[in-house]
Image (tube, rainbow, N blue to C red):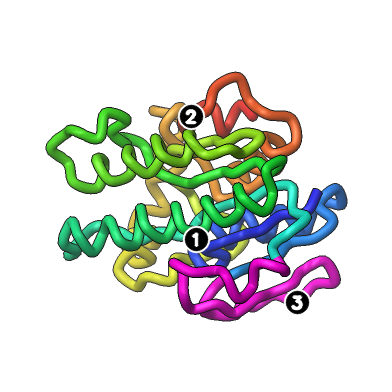
């Protein structure tokens, strides 16, 4: 399996990249992003690309892939709806539309979040935007598309958030993950489990297009 990965420097993306490089069934990982990743591997390629709305210059390098793991995203904190939608919806759909044209047999996996509003009509701005993004991804002519909606995510294997205030929260909350996993196991997953689930779902599919934390853990 050949995989394209967006958002490889983020917390979830780091986990996805780690699991891809550990899995011998993943023949190649192509990372697309503005910043380089810290890893070097024989099965890892990188394309530095700044324009997340236009891939015309690199289209020839995006052909022949079986899956895309789209982990690129930002927190809505402090952002206007227009700016958040630009990053969350416009960036995601620009990549997905290009890839669905170039690789119609591709499986596209999008990391969204628990509480996403599939009606795209609710009062929470981020949930509406995520819902609209999910809905339009599911309309594209991929072999299949899956929406991963994790709730609490425990970073493992030294993985950190690149956003300082988010990382501070994870550090402060680290002692609570064990308690949370015992009290509410359906709402907690890890960067490792998300990465492993992405690979398995891309290869074998899943019974429905939206996976919550409990589905991710079961996979």
Q: Secondary structure at mark 2?
A: strand
Image point (42%, 44%), residue name: 112
Query: Is residue 56 shown in magenta?
Result: yes
Location of residue 215 by image quarter = top right
- Decide: few, some or many residues near mark 3? Use Cα within 10 Å; few <14, some 14-19, many ≥20: few
Spatial CA span between label 1 and label 2: 21 Å
Q: Are marks 2 and 3 in contact (CB under 8 Å)?
A: no
Task: Name the residue beneath numbered marker 3.
Answer: 40
State the residue in front, 21 or 185: 21
Q: Position of residue 154 (x, y in %)?
A: 48, 49
Q: Position of residue 28 (x, y in %)?
A: 80, 60
Spatial CA span between label 1 and label 3: 18 Å
State the residue in front, 55 or 186: 55
Image point (70%, 53%), residue name: 19
Q: Earlier in the sequence, mark 1 or mark 3?
A: 1
Spatial CA span between label 2 and label 3: 32 Å
Q: Earlier in the sequence, mark 2 or mark 3?
A: 3
Viewer-side label of 2, 3: 2
Q: Position of residue 122 (x, y in %)?
A: 17, 33
Query: Is residue 184 shown in magenta?
Result: no
Location of residue 194 by image quarter = top right
Q: How many marks?
A: 3
Task: Name the residue beneath numbered marker 2.
Answer: 210
Location of residue 143 by image quarter = top right
Q: Which residues are magenta?
A: 33-61
Numbered circle sitting on residue 75: none
Q: Secondary structure at mark 3?
A: loop
Q: Position of residue 48 (x, y in %)?
A: 59, 79
Task: Name the residue beneath numbered marker 1.
Answer: 11
């Amino acid at each position: 399996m050949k995989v394209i990965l967006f958002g490889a420097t983020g917390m979830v993306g780091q986990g996805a990249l780690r699991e891809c490089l550990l899995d011998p069934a993943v023949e190649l990982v192509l990372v697309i992003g503005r910043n380089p990743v810290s890893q070097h591997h024989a099965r890892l390629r990188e394309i530095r690309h700044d324009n997340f709305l236009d891939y015309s210059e690199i289209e020839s390098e995006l052909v022949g892939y079986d899956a895309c793991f789209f982990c690129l995203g930002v927190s809505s904190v402090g952002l206007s709806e227009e700016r958040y939608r630009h990053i969350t919806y416009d960036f995601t759909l620009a990549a997905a539309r290009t890839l669905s044209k170039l690789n119609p047999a591709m499986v596209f996996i999008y990391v969204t979040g628990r509480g996403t509003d599939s009606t795209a009509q609710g009062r929470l701005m981020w949930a509406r935007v995520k819902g609209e993004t999910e809905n339009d991804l599911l309309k594209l002519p991929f072999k299949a598309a899956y929406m991963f909606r994790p709730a609490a995510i425990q970073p493992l294997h030294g993985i950190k958030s690149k956003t300082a205030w988010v990382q501070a929260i994870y550090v402060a909350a680290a002692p609570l993950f064990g308690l949370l996993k015992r009290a509410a196991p359906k709402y907690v997953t890890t960067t490792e489990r998300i990465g492993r689930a992405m690979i398995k779902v891309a290869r074998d599919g899943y019974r429905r297009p939206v996976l919550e934390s409990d589905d991710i853990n079961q996979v």
